[in-house]
């Protein structure tokens, strides 16, 4: 079945693989150095410059992958639950672009790490303490997490997704407010794999079903 420039099955396949690849990269990033809001990042840059650069570009990579993933999710439903799915996907997409701010901030701090340490620490601490600094990072988390939750609810209403995906979306939102110490990365990575991996599996499954429908129509 054709929707726009590409067949629906193709869009769903690309979206599904992007969801799964994004889940893997986001899980990797959870075990990396802090990229924002932490002066310790300067120490990481000085001590392990290649290591921090890898994780910075890792964030950029999954930010790019999320775009076709979220757009592909809008092709999962027609009719019931469609509006909620679209609202969720678009909200997540808007929140996703705030990750670019995170990566840009990390790249700027890489340059600052090569300058005199004490003035740079003072400047960064002043920036971190500024109330407006917190806003884009809050929007990043809230828009992406709430959007994903709405997306899973919309898919479930359309009877295209199991209820456990809604629970994964809710857990993803709650996990962002938790402070679990060393266990935080493990909890968030498990939730991320369940949520993004589940959406990827769903997209690939619907892609195969769309191909089967097309083949049946061609055979008639």
Image (cartoon, grey):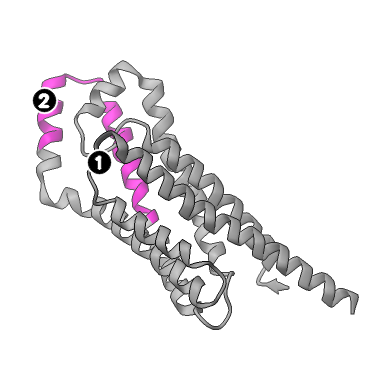
- Residue at which label 2 appears: 119
Q: Is residue 128 visible?
A: yes
- Would you identify the image quadrant in which residue 31 lies? top left
Pick whichever of labels 2 and 1 is earlier in the sequence: 2
- Residue at which label 1 appears: 180
Residue 165 included in the magenta stretch of the image: no
Tell me if label 2 and label 1 are in contact, CB under 8 Å: no
> Which residue is nearer to you in this view: 96 or 22?
22
Residue 201 located left or right of residue 146: right
Q: Residues within 10 Å of mark 1 (few under 14, many from 20)?
A: few
> Which residue is nearer to you in this view: 165 or 125?
165
Q: Residues within 10 Å of mark 2 (few under 14, many from 20)?
A: few
State which quarter of the image contains the C terminus: bottom right
- Would you identify the image quadrant in which residue 97 lies? bottom left
Residue 126 located left or right of residue 95: left
Looking at the image, the residue that sits furthest to the top is 47
The overriding secondary structure of the stretch rendered in magenta is: helix
Residue 207 against residue 197 in the figure, above or below: below
Q: Is residue 6 visible?
A: no
Q: Residue at x 42, y 72 (%)?
A: 87
> Which residue is nearer to you in this view: 168 or 91?
168
| Numbered disc 1: secondary structure | loop
Region of the chain picked out in magenta, as a range: 96-125
Residue 61 located left or right of residue 96: right
- Would you identify the image quadrant in which residue 116 lies? top left
């Amino acid at each position: 079945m054709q929707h726009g420039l590409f067949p629906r099955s193709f869009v769903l396949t690309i979206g599904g693989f992007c969801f799964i690849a994004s889940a893997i990269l986001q899980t990797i990033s959870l075990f990396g150095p802090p990229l924002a809001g932490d002066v310790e990042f300067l120490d990481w840059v000085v001590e392990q410059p290649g290591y921090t650069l890898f994780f910075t570009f890792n964030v950029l990579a999954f930010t790019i992958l999320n775009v076709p993933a979220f757009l592909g999710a809008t092709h999962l439903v027609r009719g019931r639950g469609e509006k909620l799915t679209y609202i969720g996907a678009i909200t997540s997409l808007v929140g996703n672009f705030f990750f670019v701010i995170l990566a840009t901030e990390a790249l700027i701090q890489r340059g600052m790490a090569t300058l005199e340490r004490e003035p740079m620490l003072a400047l960064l601490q002043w920036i971190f303490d500024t109330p407006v600094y917190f806003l884009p990072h809050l929007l990043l988390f809230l828009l992406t997490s709430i959007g994903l939750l709405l997306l899973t609810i919309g898919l479930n209403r359309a009877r295209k997704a199991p209820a456990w995906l809604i629970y994964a979306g809710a857990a993803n939102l709650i996990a962002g407010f938790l402070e679990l110490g060393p266990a935080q990365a493990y909890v968030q990575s498990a939730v991320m794999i369940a949520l993004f991996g589940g959406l990827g599996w769903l997209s690939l499954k619907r892609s195969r079903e769309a191909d089967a429908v097309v083949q049946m129509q061609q055979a008639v």
